[in-house]
Image (cartoon, rainbow, N blue to C red):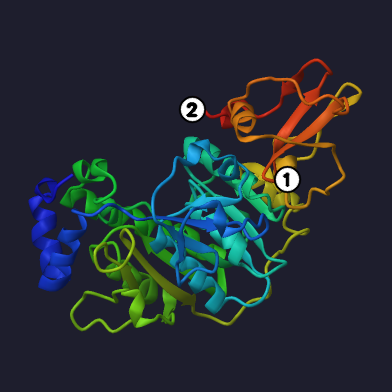
Amino acid sequence: MTIRHLPQEFTTYTAELFGPERWAQFLHSFEESSVTSIRFNPWKYAQESIFPQIEAVPWCEQGYWLTERPNFTLDPLFHAGVYYVQEAGSLFLDHVLREHINSPVLVLDLCAAPGGKSTLMRAALPEGSMLVSNEPDRRRANILLENMLKQGHPDVLVTHNYASDFAKTKWTFDVILTDVPCSGEGLFRRDEKTISEWSVDNVHFCQKRQRQILQDIWPCLRPGGLLIYSTCTFNTHENEENVRFIADELGAEILPVSVCPQWQITGSLLPGWTQPVYRFIPGVSRSEGLFIAVLRKKGETSAAPLLPGSARHHAHIHRLIHLLSDGIPTPEQKGKEQIPSAAQALSIRLSADEYPRVELPLAEAQRYLRRESFALPAGTPRGFVLVTYGGHPLGFMKNLGDRANNLYPKNWAIRSL
């Protein structure tokens, strides 16, 4: 993709917004390959040597840049939830959370699919916190569910609702992340489809929709709670103007986040705007495009909201939300037999001696992920067996002796090698 594909209206507006130096750096980034970054799951620790060379992302404790992009689909550790492939700019959320949150909280990720920011939040939040990971779009919600279950943490609820649905529950949160649908200008270098879908009309449509989402979810943020607002676009209509809307119309103060000059994070691009907001620009920062701001809701701090246990079993809330997963699913009773769930295998709470384990070599681990059936080694106990790769659980097989049934979920299976 070359810069000649960029829409003229975008070029005119953004060149003036960035200024000559940043605009030149942005255009130069199209001549370079996008960098690949990953984030390790702290509960499924893997030595960084599983990748030939890595470099730490300074604003994320478990984040690393890779020197080259491997075929992640072929790596069983990716499917085991040992790490997540995530754009470096979005990893800045880790730094935001660790700076502003130091006690257990109830958190809502409102537009969470495919799950990068939700898996990051669950890793960065203090122990005892609970995360509600939500996606309004049903198809994308299924992808979110898979990624959250592979993360393996029990204190996560996955839901499929609109912002207005949450308002009906009277449920309030300490922190709400609104990574809202946007015009996607920050992804132009990586995804040419976002360029063809861009228009001035769509920018203004997105701004209107973003404000409706914010208004719908605002009653669910308790007074004193944090709203984290983010987009993957550059323009000020969807960014600074919406932050000003939250602060002035909804009632919030904008909070600063400490940054190092070496990170090359750009602040606001509005003339005279001195509020702390943070923008990643390809070619300037080592990432794709991202905008993020942190706001605290005004008002007298209210009582602590429901936390794990009371929230999970609150019947009133469950009647009003579409719940896809309530922590780690339990075994399914079929006749006299209890069939373990795939999510159990990937849970960080699975005890080492709960099921017999068989370590698979790479080729057989890939066969397992393709949902093929094959015989397990002689001497393997009959019944449900946990198969692993690199010591990390992948899922279950039912050993019948001369063969073993593959219990990996159909909708998780990789299609080919």
Q: Quadrant of the N terminus?
A: top left
Mark 1 element type:
loop
Residue at the limit of the structure toward the top, as seen here: 402
Residue name at image x 22 percent, y 42 percent: 197
Please, what is the three-letter code of the amino acid marked with disc 1? Ile
**Residue under the point 71% across and 64% down:** 306
User: Residue 208's x, y, as percent?
Assistant: 30, 55
Residue 109 visible here? no
Judge depth for marks 2 and 1 and give the one in front.
2
Observer-nearest residue: 310 or 389? 389
Q: For mark 2, give the secondary structure.
A: loop
Mark 1 neighbour density, 10 Å: few (under 14) some (14–19) many (20 or more): many
Query: Which residue is at the front of the view, 138 or 342?
Result: 342
Pointer 2: what residue?
417
Find residue 368 and report its image quarter.
Answer: top right
Q: Is residue 287 left or right of residue 175?
A: left
Q: Which mark is residue 121?
A: none
Which is more N-terminal, label 1 or label 2? 1
Please give left or right for residue 29 compared with residue 307 in the image: left
For marks 2 and 1, give the CA distance: 29 Å
Percent across and percent down for residue 4 are 9, 48
Residue 60, visible in the rendered structure: yes
Residue at figure coordinates x 58%, y 26% from the top left: 370
- What residue sits right under mark 1 in the picture? 328
Whether residues under marks 2 and 1 lie with C-beta atoms below 8 angstroms apart, the answer is no
- Left/right placement of residue 43 relative to residue 237 reads right
Q: Where residue 15 sits: x, y (%)?
A: 11, 65
- Position of residue 76 measured from the top left corner of the image (x, y, whole percent): 59, 39
Q: Which residue lies at the image location 17% right of the left edge and 70% below the top edge?
A: 22
The residue closer to the viewer here, 107 or 123, is: 123
Q: Amino acid at mark 2?
A: Leu
